[in-house]
Image (cartoon, helix red, strand yellow):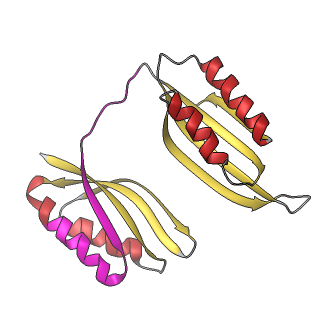
Amino acid sequence: MPGSLVLTVIGPDRPGLVDALSTTIAAHGANWLESRMARLAGHFAGLLRVSVPEANTTALGVALQALEREGLRVLVEASELSEPDTRSAILALELVGLDRPGIIRDVSRALAERGVNVEELDTCCESAPMSGETLFRAQARLRVPARIRIEELRATLEKIASELMVDLSLEDA
């Protein structure tokens, strides 16, 4: 039975890193299942999940570690496939406002205090169209436990958004 591995990769960005990674994975009979990868501040960083035949797991791990010679560090973690609580709600959070330290800290603290899981988070800074000031944008996919009332969560986040002077929306995903 195949096992599942979650890989974290990082290294100075250059052409060929995804090729080196995918070639190593395929050479060990593993299957690339899902990933998120990006160039950040001159580095290539990513997360991916692969399935691999149990007999090849150790050899794949060794081969992935060898990619460090090419400048790509890989952290390998065995994973269990767990099914999320089907009673939980999936919400999309969008936030935009003038950039300042602490925006994600304040929002994520409110979510964590309520047991809300941040399943995906994408953020960026960009120049505002008219003023040229730096805008911070965030999009998140949230898994909200069934015990949490969505309207109370929305009111809490709107209060934080008001204090931070950012626009925030929370919708069904």
Q: Quadrant of the C terminus?
A: top right
8 sits left or right of 108 in the view: left
Give the image location of residue 12, x and y in percent: 46, 78
Give the image location of residue 59, x and y in percent: 13, 67
Number of on-image labels? 0
Write the residue at 28% across / 72% down. Answer: 23
Specify start and end residues of the magenta stretch as a single range: 59-86
Question: Looking at the rendering, which quadrant does residue 62 occupy?
Answer: bottom left
Q: Quadrant of the N terminus?
A: top left
Is 18 contained in the magenta span? Answer: no
The furthest residue to the bottom? 69
Vertically, is 159 above or below 3? above
Vertically, is 67 above or below 61? below
61 sits left or right of 38 in the view: left
Vertically, is 162 above or below 58? above
Is 77 contained in the magenta span? Answer: yes
Give the image location of residue 10, x and y in percent: 41, 69
Write the residue at 57% across / 30% down. Answer: 91
The furthest residue to the left? 55
Give the image location of residue 28, x and y in percent: 18, 66
158 sits left or right of 133 in the view: left
Write the residue at 66% across / 49% down. Answer: 102
Write the residue at 55% across / 47% down. Answer: 121
